[in-house]
Amino acid sequence: MSADTEALQSTPISYYYLWHLTALGVIDADYGSPPLVPPAENETAVCGRPGPEISGTIWDTIAASGPVRPARVALIDVGVAPDHPNLITRLDRDASIDLTTHRYGSRVADILNTTTSFDREEKHSFFAGLSIAALGNLGLSSDDREYLNDIVSEYAASQGVIRRLFHPEALFSSHGTCCAGLIVGEPAVILEEGGTSATPESAFYDDRDGIPFPSANRNVLPYFGVDPFSQLISIRTSFEDDVQQFIAAFLYAFHMQADVIVLPRGLPDPKRSRVRPKNELKADLELWKNQAAADLFARIALGESGPAELEPKAPQKGSNPDRAWHVLKQLIIAISRQIPVVCAAGNSGESQLIYPASLAAADNGIIAVGAVTVEGYRSGYSNYGEGLTVVSPADDGEVFNRHQLRVDRLSPFAAQHDYGAFGVREYQHSHFSLLTTDLPGIFGYGRGAEPWSAIVPFGDNPGVGGGYYTAFGGTSGASALAGGVCALIQRAHKSRNGVGARLSGPVVKSILRGASRLDTAVAPGVRALTADCMNAEGEDALNMTYFFGSGLPDVRAAVAAVLAL
């Protein structure tokens, strides 16, 4: 039995918080039967035993196939907490970049390992040698091709900066930190004197006085992402509608030869990110009783294409504001044919995907990921519909509309309402969420204290794990997990074919879809994937792929398919 499996089995902390790894097949765990009596003190009420019995991991399977060769995952998000103990050795600082504070990229230097003075910035060429020749024909017109070539030439000759300031991620990277933990998080050992050590050989447990625990700081959990042996490149972008930073982000991910690109969010394309009117709603507007609403919709649409003198961000006459966004679209599709691009499907509960997940098609490597709960249903908020590739585990959202009821019956507010009076079909609400790494401090989701400032006694710091962890979910979390699965696929391929080997986006997507199932339960749950009626009458009678794509990935089947190539 490997050190990985032994570490998992020896932990005194229940591994129920890693249920999503069981659901994907990353770890093999027996949760036993539900308890028949209330648990005794210091026992877990999960499964009749203090914790799941771990019998193996997919990491052992890949390690047995050849040398451990990390994959490189480019995460395009709002940044990653650089000093989180479960991420510090997984984050490739020398490759990560911040595209929000400098047009051509910036990075914060490691002030402890540099001879440069602190009072100035250094110039640095992050995009030196950039070329997109390997992408071939992007399907652009001659004018658009010239436009993109000008951008590439500008960035190839550009100079960003290396700074001596504090990390901006220390304030704004909560979302990216959560996604990073789900992808590559690994256990860490915090030494007594405040140093950090985390390696595959030493990252599991100190055994002092015969009691195994992860570190001197009891706030730190022995946390695992889907692939804790791969490396993460953080590409920091903002939520502003600045198309240039997104073009730069995808160019940089391609330039760094990432094996997987994860985009756990949408892009604010003013044209392609609009929600399309549904046919059933358009038909309703044609009814006599809805003519006033139809007139309002028509006037709003006219205003969008009419005079814009009062719009401060309106383009000047003669410009083509969509050109850059069109170029970005074609760039994403072209890059996906070489590198899988994993995208979140969206959290609005609509039967259509957000952009750019909506670009997923059979001839590209864009992977659109929806969310499912341990109860086997689509997460209440998860988008679904045409183009969805697969689903991954996440938390749930309450739903109360004319098609379904899904409420948290454990909430004290639930007892105040007679939901049965509405006669709406009820679907089981899930209480499971994804536990993942959080931005420490008050700016994180958990809003804990600052656990890095001292060795904080266990339980004395607010927030899960003293602010190091938080409950998370959404299609952001689901897409991060799917990104980790893609990293495992690439790493299994590298174990047999060398560190420079990489499967193309469509090949990874095909392997992922072929290893996914629609007739499976989301372990440790027991209900098979089940469609729900969300936005239209009788919707749950539609094909299962409409709600779940190819289904829930089975990591073992995916890795076996790679090793058989």
Image (tube, helix red, strand yellow):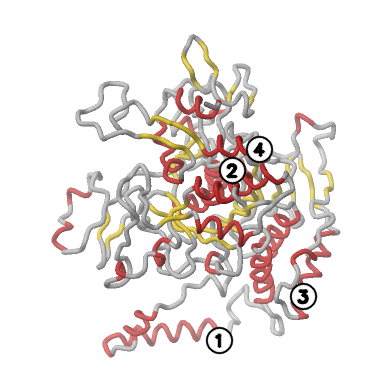
Of the image marks 3 and 4, the number of the one nearer the N terminus? 4
Q: Which residue is labeled 3 in the image?
A: 145
Q: Which residue is labeled 1 in the image?
A: 306
Q: CA distance from mark 1 to mark 4?
A: 62 Å
Q: Are marks 3 and 4 in contact (CB under 8 Å)?
A: no
Categorize mark 4 by other alpha carbons within 10 Å: few (<14), some (14-19), many (20+). Answer: some
| Mark seen at residue 66 | 4
Which residue: 34% across, 70% down? 542
Left or right: residue 371 versus residue 47 is right
Q: Residue 246 at what x, y percent from top left?
A: 66, 61
Number of numbered labels in the structure image:
4
Q: Are marks 2 and 3 in contact (CB under 8 Å)?
A: no
Viewer-closest of 42 and 193: 42
Above or below 340: residue 285: below
Categorize mark 1 by other alpha carbons within 10 Å: few (<14), some (14-19), many (20+). Answer: few
Q: Quadrant of residue 386?
A: bottom left
Q: CA distance from mark 2 to mark 1?
A: 40 Å
Which residue: 49% across, 29% down? 221
Give amino acid for label 2: Leu
Above or below 493: residue 357: below
Of the image marks 2 and 4, the number of the one nearer the N terminus? 4
Left or right: residue 52 versus residue 152 is left
Q: Which element carries disc 2, helix, strand or loop?
A: helix
